[in-house]
Amino acid sequence: MTIQIDTLFDEKAIAERIEALAAEVADAKPEKLLVVGILNGSFIFAADLVRAMHRAGLQPEMAFMRLSSYGSGTISSGNVEIHQDVDSDVNDRDIILVDDILESGRTLNFAKERLLSRGAKSVKIAALLDKQESRKAPIEADYVGFACPDKFVVGYGMDMAHAWRQLPFIGYVVPSDKSGGDS
Ligand code: IMP
Ligand code: MG
């Protein structure tokens, strides 16, 4: 069975949106800026975002957290597991947490609370895609790339069963009953 992937946001649209996000971040004049990418899904977005930040006149440092969340039936953040924590000093810094998709919000809510409890001055959220209608935790993004329709998306760092992260655009998996027929 072949999997059909259609384009949702192309490379040009993504690049333009990221320049605009970086300009918004620069307008807020962050101090001692630390950008924290949530692995694995954010790796391409974070890489492009920090380079756009550089062009916007910022000098961010970069760190990573690797987290996974389990279960879908509870609202607690206790079901988020830390595989790799931020190893930089976060005390008194402005932090931007970067992730691919803000969906239930459990992962980013957990990461934000953790960094604040470690003494961060502020923690803002940059999400490439926002699945607003799926929110379960009390969190919103400060910087959003695009509102995401209710589709399973892949590419630009995002995966389906570990595949498709390498696509340079954001695509969506076309349900197989619609991908047959004339093509
Ligand atoms: P949540 O906000 O804690 O529910 O976590 C959202 C995470 O689920 C994202 O960072 C992705 O890793 C994953 N995810 C949600 N929707 C999709 C999708 O459509 N494609 C790929 N990964 C997704
Ligand atoms: Mg993720």
Image (cartoon, rainbow, N blue to C red):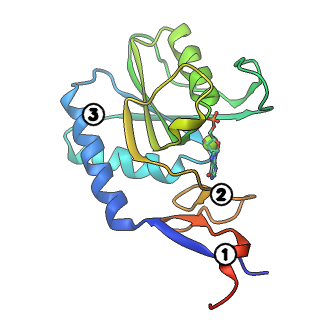
Residue at 20% in and 43% down: 56
Q: Which residue is mark 3?
A: 25
Q: Which residue is mark 2?
A: 159
- Percent coordinates x, y for residue 32 in the rendering: 32, 22
Q: Are the residues tagged 3 and 2 within 8 Å (C-beta)? A: no
Q: Which residue is mark 1?
A: 178
Say which mark, if any, is on residue 30: none
* Above/below status of 179 relative to 68: below
Instruction: Look at label 3 and name its amino acid.
Output: Val
Quarter holding residue 179: bottom right
| Helix, strand or loop under label 3 | helix
Number of residues whose C-alpha sits closer than 10 Å to that of mark 2, classed few (under 14), some (14–19) or many (20 or more) = some
Left or right: residue 73 compared with residue 153 = right
Residue at 50% in and 12% down: 116
Separation (CA) of disc 2 from disc 1: 21 Å
Q: Quadrant of the C terminus?
A: bottom right
Left or right: residue 91 compared with residue 76 = left
Instruction: Look at label 2 and name its amino acid.
Output: Asp
- Percent coordinates x, y for residue 104 in the rendering: 62, 32
- Percent coordinates x, y for residue 156 in the rendering: 51, 59
Instruction: Look at label 1 and name its amino acid.
Output: Lys
Separation (CA) of disc 3 from disc 2: 27 Å
